[in-house]
Image (tube, helix red, strand yellow):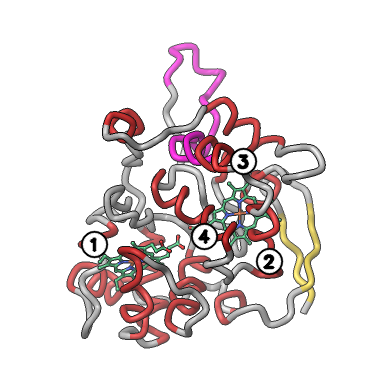
Amino acid sequence: MLKTIKYSSGMIAVVAFISFSAAASEESPMNGNVANGKKIFTEGKGAAVACMTCHGETGWGTEAMGAPRLANLGYPYVLKQLTDLAEGRRTPSGAGAVMPLFAQQLSEQDRRDVSAYVNSLNSPPELSDLKALKEGGQPIGEKYKGQILVKFGVLGKVSACQSCHGYNGRGAAPIFPVIGEQKFTYLVNQLHNWRDGSRANDPYGMMRAIAKNLSDEDILDAATYLSTAPRTTPNTFDNTNKTEKAQ
Ligand code: HEC
Ligand code: HEC
């Protein structure tokens, strides 16, 4: 199957897909039942504990658990992850080691429902508190270096993150997830997982190819920038100088 991806910048990229996952073919229309998704998210199902216990009531994730933001992350991406988790293609360690079992408790339709529900969550961002993390002894990177990586990459070594993930990592559905305003700890963990190959569910090894050229420092820098990188630019025409976000 040949698919055309339209980037937010207006660029067109053509990527060949070999039946890469169930999620891609279900990218649209979104066929989840939001009410059932909400029930699963807030009450759990079978052995699956209520998702909000770890991912937060608003879906903005929990730093201490390494649990990612799911709110408004993109329906096809979340559905793909739940499918990969349920079918053994993604096997997290640490607090997330429960995720494959939880995903298996959900039917295919349940996974669509909960993906649709979290995609509808759109409350104001609850961003990582980098200052508190630093005070707690967590090494934090340099924001400006992370910004350079995200916007320009490293010549001959690392592609700019935003060439796939969109401006400030705001996502380019259906393939490229939102990585901006994602939890710091989760970003760091995933970049390490891609680099050491313990996460290997990326189509065409795209993320493993990127991460293998990232140093520990690059990972901290990128996560430091991305975790608070807004998805839109401040409105430069607004002379009251507010930085409200357009939805
Ligand atoms: C005990 C805590 C916990 C519970 C409960 C939980 N999760 Fe998770 N979840 C995690 C952690 C931690 C990760 C990160 C795994 C990793 O590091 O790869 C995760 C990862 C995910 C991801 C991958 C997100 C991404 O950006 O790739 C999805 C999707 C997800 N969870 C959905 C759910 C759903 C739906 C439920 C409820 C049925 C749920 N989770 C319940 C802790 C939890
Ligand atoms: C060639 C395209 C491409 C580039 C460039 C790229 N990524 Fe990715 N990235 C992907 C794809 C595709 C996925 C989704 C993998 C999947 O489906 O599980 C992904 C997933 C991720 C994830 C996991 C998100 C989540 O919710 O679990 C992180 C973190 C990430 N990328 C960070 C980065 C960073 C940081 C950079 C720049 C240094 C970067 N990416 C550059 C293609 C790319």
Confirm or reject: label 1 Cβ below 8 Å from ligand 1. yes
At horizontal 66% and vertical 54% (from top left) the residue drawn is: 212
Residue beneath disc 3: 167
At horizontal 42% and vertical 82% (from top left) the residue drawn is: 86
Residue beneath disc 2: 205
Whole-percent x, y for residue 87 in the image: 47, 85
Q: Secondary structure at mark 4?
A: helix
| Magenta-highlighted residues | 222-242
Which comes before the other along the chain, label 2 or label 4? 4
CA distance for labels 3 and 2: 22 Å
- Callout 2 environment at 10 Å: few (<14), some (14 to 19), or many (20+)? few
Amino acid at pointer 4: Asn
Whole-percent x, y for residue 89 in the image: 52, 78
- Callout 3 environment at 10 Å: few (<14), some (14 to 19), or many (20+)? many
**Residue 224 lies in the magenta-colored region:** yes
Q: Where on the image, by quarter, is ligand 2?
A: bottom right
Quadrant in the picture for the C terminus: top left
Q: Is residue 238 above or below residue 218?
A: above
Residue beneath disc 4: 193
Whole-percent x, y for residue 151 in the image: 67, 35
Question: Closer to the observer: label 2 or label 4?
Answer: 4
Whole-percent x, y for residue 148 in the image: 65, 31
Going by the image, does 13 lie left or right of 44? right
CA distance for labels 3 and 1: 28 Å
